[in-house]
Every structure is written in structure tokens, then in C-alpha cells.
Image (tube, rainbow, N blue to C red):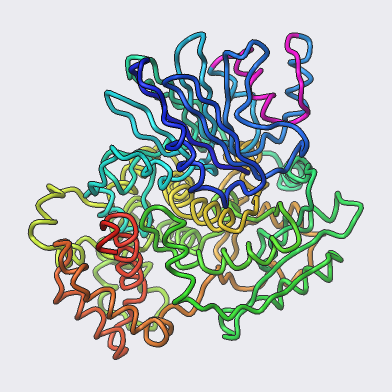
Amino acid sequence: MCGICGVWYFDADRPVDESLLARMMDQMIHRGPDEAGAHLDGSVGLGFRRLSIIDLAGSQQPMCNEDGRVWIVFNGEIYNFQELRQRLLDRHTFSTVGDTETILHAYEEYGLACVDHMRGMFGFAIWDARENRLTMAVDRFGKKPLYYLLDDEKLLFASELKSILQHPGVSRELDAEALDEYLTNGAITAPRSIFAGIRKLPPGHIMTVSADGQARLTEYWHPHMATPEKWDTRPLDDMAAELRELLLEAVRLRMISDVPLGAFLSGGVDSSAVVALMSHVSTQPVRTFSIGFDETFFDETSYAQAVAEYCRTDHLREVVRPDVVAILPKLIHQYDEPFADSSMIPTYYVSQAARQHVTVSLSGDGGDEVFAGYRQYIYGARQYFLKGLLPTVLRPSAARLARFIPRFAKVGPYLATVDREARVWGMRTSDFFSAAQRRQLYTGEALARLDGYQGEQVRIAAFERALHLDWLSQLQYSDLTVYMPGDILVKVDRASMLASLEVRCPLLDHEVFEFMARVPTRYKIGLRDTKTLLKKAVGDLLPPAIYTRNKMGFHIPLAEWLRGPLQPMLRDVLLSTSARGRGLFETTVVQRLLDEHVSQQQNHKERLWALLCFELWAREYVDTPAAR
């Protein structure tokens, strides 16, 4: 895992400043603490920071082809590089045994279609002096980030936004729509970034830029879900057997490493399945890592311990007592953009714990999206079961009847939305700001900048692209294209890279996904349970209690922290002169949210956390050094 960056001035007589490239690289030392490299060729400069994983003695970057006219900087891992290398050996000369050179020669062999031959996670840039063009690409799900700025004069790109900001000509004007999306969802989805002039390359896309500054953006892969008539209707046992083989292969490929390797183990189904599969193929005990908290409600390390004992792993459990006041500014700096998923804190701590012993860790990320594990999917299953019991003509009346059902009656919420489709009730419930709450929060000037835009439109657009699918596939598609790449994968990449740890996600192998995309809904989820096929595929490898436990997620006692140790910071930051001076939020509304939460009249934990993270971010990335 590494950090890459580059500069290309379209004026061939304007050389790249070596000190600029060095500053861009220095911003990402955490991504690559082992080595640094640069290539300067007039108006083109490529920079690289390396975390050595494969071919430790070789594979230095930037790397060139045989004639020195094609150069690459690459962040990530190509898991099938050995197979791909064999296909290329007859026509290309290799001087290393790593995956970087395989990408380079695959580009020479297949052109832009080289990405179709890769199985892995990546963000790379290739400078082709023969064609006088630069090509950038991001992996299918967007596990590896790539920011860029393109204007009439130049192209800047980097694994992290903070590197691009080293260029003195970069504007820090906020993107109003990106801010609204952040306040809606807690994160900002590609292609937007928080700055109006900087963009993120979307998952599954490749972009070519020519010497006249013209760019061509092409989607080479998309997470298509099969319609019911194209589902695989084989027996459940047959499909479980095939899934098991696919998962074993995905795990085997991700265990290729020249440095120590382990796995995160939370005790949930996904991470437990990954650890069980690793133990199944490994000849040595797998090293596993989990963190716990003093607060019992948020601690699930007992489940992790049970899996570790069952799979006979070399397990490390660490109890964390986070100094959130101290760690939060560090994380805010690392995430580049406003980011309000509070589980970034435990993700960083478990990455830090693992990094003391290994350089690579496998994780269960992506399992909820691919195998249908979220709670709202259970809600959907029950919703559609109820729909089947009620004739269409009676559903509006049933929805009205729900208003008179006592709150403690579980059937009430289902009846209330029984006349609605997945697009309406399936929208991920936001704990951040609703459209009405944002209208109250914004100042008149900030609201005018939005010109009617609403952050919900990102999720709505995803549902509109999936209307031809069944209800579960619509929900999965929305999470796969919005929530996962915008939140989950960002959280894991930034937190793990801050600890200089590479994290690999076998459950997000694209061949595993393409298999699951054809699995019927009844094989994925029931009225009480999720991930039916996954549990069937790996059921004999894990203790039964793991499959029957309640889902917890990676949570922290955020509400209590905001009333306790974080309250002084919260008041000082949100009601500060600098916060009021931005002219974005109504101070009276912020004050009310704070007072209601502290007095326990309301639980505004996610909303206050989002505002706190934004203001800390703005101080770091928007204000002048003097103001900071």
C-alpha cells in the first residue's frame, strides 16, 4: 500500500518544481514510510511513497517500461499478478517480481483495457510519453482513493487531497452541494469532494488526459445486480459449495505477502468468516486482532475470543480507553474531507494494534453489502411479507390505521409504510440532518448557494438506477454505490493508512460479488436472519453462536462522550468566533442542539458530531495559518 501523486503542466516549457513534488509526497509519509521516489521529465512529475509488501528488494517506483517512455505510480495490490505476468512473459521483459511491473506491461499489451484483467485494489497513474497522455484508474469498488484537479493549465493528482493542496494555485472554495451531502450522510461520495475544484475518480472508472487538457472518463465496471429472471436457481447446497470455493480463492490470493500478515476479528459474521477461511488454508495459526472497550454494551471481544479459540488463531485482544480529545484532530487531518462516521476511531485503534505485529491485515468489510447483512434488509423482508398479505387496495387504509397503533407495537412501522416502495422506505435512515433540519441549520446565504439541491439526491439517484430490480437488490445496489464507497471504504483506508497498515477485503472480491449478484433473494435473507448463503457456505468452520448473535457494528459511546469529556471542546469549537464567522450555520440552532443533547432532552449525537468534525476540518483545511 502506498501513496502516489503527480503534476502535469500542459505548457511543455513549464517545468515541475521538484520541491513541490517533494511536499506532495511528504504529506503521505504514513501511506509509505519505507521508501520515496520521484520522476521529473520537464512538465511532468510523478511522486511515490512506498509501504513495502511484495518484492521488498525491488519494484521501486516510479517505474518505467523497457524503453523508458512509459512510467507508472501505483497504490494497491493486484492479487492475480502472478497469473497475469505469465500471460505477458512471452512478449515483455520483466526486471522485477512484483505486481507494479505487471500493470505496466499489461497497459502496453491491452491499452486501457488492462484494468479488465486485474483482480485487486488499486489507484494508479501511467504517463505515456509516446502518446503524450496520462491515464488514471481506480479499482472496481473504489477501495483505493485518487483525487485530481484538472483545469486549462494543469493536472494534479494524489492519493490524498492534502497533497494536491500543496500546489499554491489550488482554490479552497467549498462545494455547497458536497457540504449538503455531508450533513445528510456524514460523508461525501465521488466524484465530488468538499472543494469545488477538486474531484475524486469514481469506483470502476478510468480517465485519460491529453496534452490539450481534454479528459475522457470511462466506466469499465459497474456493480450490476441481476433481475429475477436471470437469477441462479440451483439448489441452495450447490450454490453454497460454489461460494465456498470462490471465497477460499479470494482469501488465498489476499494472503500472498512478503511481510507479516494477520486479520481483524470483531466477532461478527464477516470478520469471523474471513478468519475461518484463512485458518482453513493456512499451515500456521493466523494472527488475529480485536479491540474492546470498558463499556460492556460496546464490547464484543468475547465473541472474537470464541472464534479465535475455535479457529486456533494467535489472538491479541486490546482494551482501548480512547483519548478522543487528543486523537480527533489527528484523524480530522488524515481524512482530508469532513467525515462523520465515528467508527473511524475504533478502526484506527485496531489498525494501530495490528500494525505492532503485522504489515497486512485482512478484514470483513463489504460483507453486509454483498451478502445482505444490514438491519434494514430484515425490515425490507418483513415489509414485503406484509405486502403479500394485504391486497393493494387495502394498503393505503392500513397505512392510515398505523397512526392509531401504540408505539410499542412492532407492527406499527411496517403498516405505516406498507403502501410505499423500496425507493421510499428503503432510504438508509439518516442519524444526521434531514432536509427540514438542514433548512433550519443553514443561514439564508448558505441556503441560497444550494439553489434547491438536497443531499438526499445521491441516494435517490441510486434507487432510480435500480428500479428494474427486486426490493433487496435495490437496497444492496444503493449501499454498494453510495454508502460503501463513500463511507465504509474511506473509513478503513484512511484509518489503516494512518497506522501504515495495508487492509485487504476478500469479501469484496469482484468475482465473489458477481456470483452473489445472481443469487435469489430467498437465499440471502429471511424474516429473522441475514446472510443465509454465506452462513451456509462457511457454517462448519465457525462456532454456531456466531450465527445467532445480534449484530452490533463498530460503535463507540458517542452520546456519552459528547455530554462528558467532549463537551468542553464541543462548546468551544461550535460556538467559536471562527465557526460563527463562516456564515454557514445559524448559531441559535447549533446552541439549541447542544443544549438539548447535554440536558438529555434529545439525542443529537450524530448531528453534533458532524458539526464538530466539520468545524475542526475547516480550521485545518480552510482557515489561513494565522487564523489557525
Q: Residue at the bottom extreme?
A: 599
Residue 371 in the image: state x and y as whole percent: 60, 51
Question: Does the magenta portion include 502?
Answer: no
Residue 584 found in image quarter? bottom left
Q: Which residues are magenta?
A: 91-111
Residue 602 lies left or right of residue 494; in this view the side is left
Q: Quadrant of the C terminus?
A: bottom left
* Residue 498, visible in the rendered structure: yes
Q: How many marks?
A: 0
In front of the other: 88 or 302: 88
Residue 131 in the image: state x and y as whole percent: 48, 9
Q: Residue at the right extreme?
A: 283
* Residue 183, visible in the rendered structure: no
Residue 492 found in image quarter? bottom right
> Which residue is found at the position 35% from the left and 34% from the top?
149
In front of the other: 48 or 559: 48
Q: Is residue 205 above or below residue 406?
A: above
Q: Is residue 591 above or below residue 434?
A: below
> Which residue is found at the position 30% from the left and 62% from the top?
619
> Which residue is found at the position 13% from the left and 49% from the top?
449
Question: Does the magenta portion include 100?
Answer: yes
In front of the other: 361 or 498: 498
Q: Quadrant of the N terminus?
A: top right
